[in-house]
Amino acid sequence: MLLRIVVLRGNLKTTLIGVNEYRVDVQESKLAMNIEEADWRRQAACKGANGDLFYPKSVWSRESKDVRQQREQMAKRVCARCSVQASCLDWALRNGEVVGVWGGKTERERRALAKSSQKTATLGVG
């Protein structure tokens, strides 16, 4: 049984989520982040689009290079007209999303961005 209780203590809002005997405290900042993330997803150009454009048919079966490139280019066209492309890419990078096209970037492109930003942080640049 899932039980959700909101407790107000001054300016801090805590949600207590209980499943049987287990309880997890979630503070307002995390809830606000989830609401913010949900907001950009509602505005995404890919909302309601065919998911096959953004993800390979199966992680276990390999698609040909030509099919993959064609699929990724079509997905990137959707991303190019999206008003929340930057938020989408930021979410994918922060959460280590490893599959699909997110924020107009493929898996390889996101890995390169992450590697580049790690290098920059290590060198103390920026």
Image (tube, grey):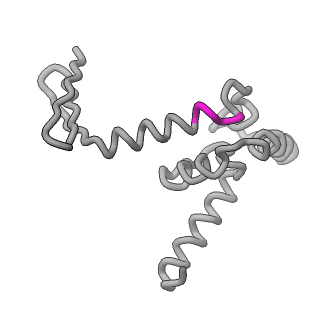
The vertical placement of 66 against 20, above or below, is below
The region drawn magenta spans: 41-45
User: Residue 95 location, x and y as percent?
Assistant: 48, 50
Q: Nearer the viewer, residue 40 or 9?
A: 9
Q: Residue at x 53, y 83 (%)?
A: 125
Residue appearing at x 66%, y 29% in the figure: 47
Question: Which of the 4 image quarters holds residue 78?
Answer: top right
State the count of labels. 0
Q: In this view, does 48 lie to the left or right of 38?
A: right
Dominant secondary-structure state across the stretch colored magenta? helix
**Residue 19: % across, % down:** 20, 22
Q: Furthest residue to the front?
A: 10
Q: In which quarter of the image is the C terminus?
A: bottom right
Whole-percent x, y for residue 26 in the image: 25, 39
Q: Is residue 13 above or below residue 1?
A: below
Q: In the drawing, does residue 122 fall left or right of residue 73?
A: left
98, 12: nearer the viewer: 12
* Residue 66, quarter of the rendered image: top right
x then y, percent, for residue 45: 71, 35
Q: In this view, does 18 lie above or below 28?
A: above
The residue located at (72%, 27%) in the rendering is 49
Q: Is residue 37 visible?
A: yes
- Residue sitting at x 53%, y 49%: 91
Task: State the residue in front, 50 or 31.
Answer: 31
Quadrant in which the N terminus appears: top left
For the residue pair 4 and 54, the one nearer the viewer reads as 4
